[in-house]
Image (spheres, rainbow, N blue to C red):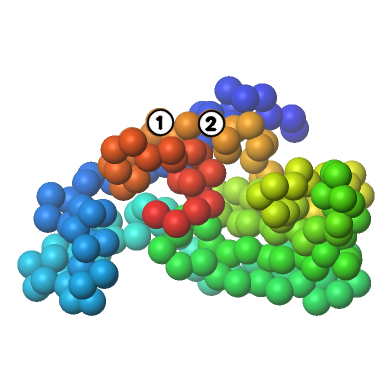
Amino acid sequence: MTMVDADWWSMLRALDEPVAAPESIGRESILRALVAGTMPESMLAALHQRVARGEGDALAVPRDFDHAGTQGRFERLTERLSEAYGCPCDSALAQDSACFGSIRIPAEASRSHTKRTRIPLPLVVRVSAFGGLATYAASSPSDQKPYLHPDDRRQIEHALAGLGYLVVPEHILAAPYDGPNGWVFGPGADATWFTRFFNHL
């Protein structure tokens, strides 16, 4: 089944569960507490209340999150990509992020490269904690444009599809975030839908 843009927007908005901005534990006050190295008792109490109400992780994971199932599928994806590329692919779990984890395919195993200098590039596959969403890209220096080889696209998308992941189109993820949880990014933030589902919150 091919999804059109309207289908993607409908799905992403349905997955983006609104979470009310807590009055006493806004993003800025949490960041100040982290910098100071201490968290006031009132802030800790407010955080515990949110967790008790089932809201503690609603930004980073959905309320019905199946950690064991998501972990198992992520590990199988790592194995499939390692087999497809004939080398171990490193994986890492994300923290304070809607991204569940990422898998790095080494540059020496990929066929992707920089456009101008043709330097081989590693590939990064990211899996969201929401709805089996996934994305991937070539990791290149900021001054170089990456060329993602069609063979890499095929191998990665085959591994993702085989485990039921949905690869979100790049132009959808690059669109400015206009969902209900914009308060977490703060005013003037250049948040995108990639930020919402695949980046730190």
If the image is split into quadrants, where does the N terminus sit?
top right
Numbered-mark total: 2
Amino acid type, callout 1: Asp
The correct choice, above or below, for 199 with respect to 38 in the image is above
Q: In terms of depth relative to the viewer, which is nearer, 177 or 37?
A: 37
Amino acid type, callout 2: Ala
Q: Position of residue 183 (x, y in %)?
A: 28, 42
**Residue occupying the point 48% across, 46% down:** 195
Distance from disc 2 to disc 1, alpha carbons, whole Å, reads 9 Å
Q: Which residue is mark 2?
A: 175
Left or right side of 79 for 116? right
Q: Determine whether the residue tagged by mark 1 lies in a helix, strand or loop.
A: loop
Q: In terms of depth relative to the viewer, which is nearer, 116 or 133?
A: 116
Whether the residues at callouts 2 and 1 have beta carbons within 8 Å, the answer is: no
If the image is split into quadrants, where does the C terminus sit?
bottom left
Disc 1 crowd rating (10 Å Cα; few below 14, some 14-19, many 20+) is few
Mark number, residue 178: 1
**Residue occupying the point 76% across, 43% down:** 145
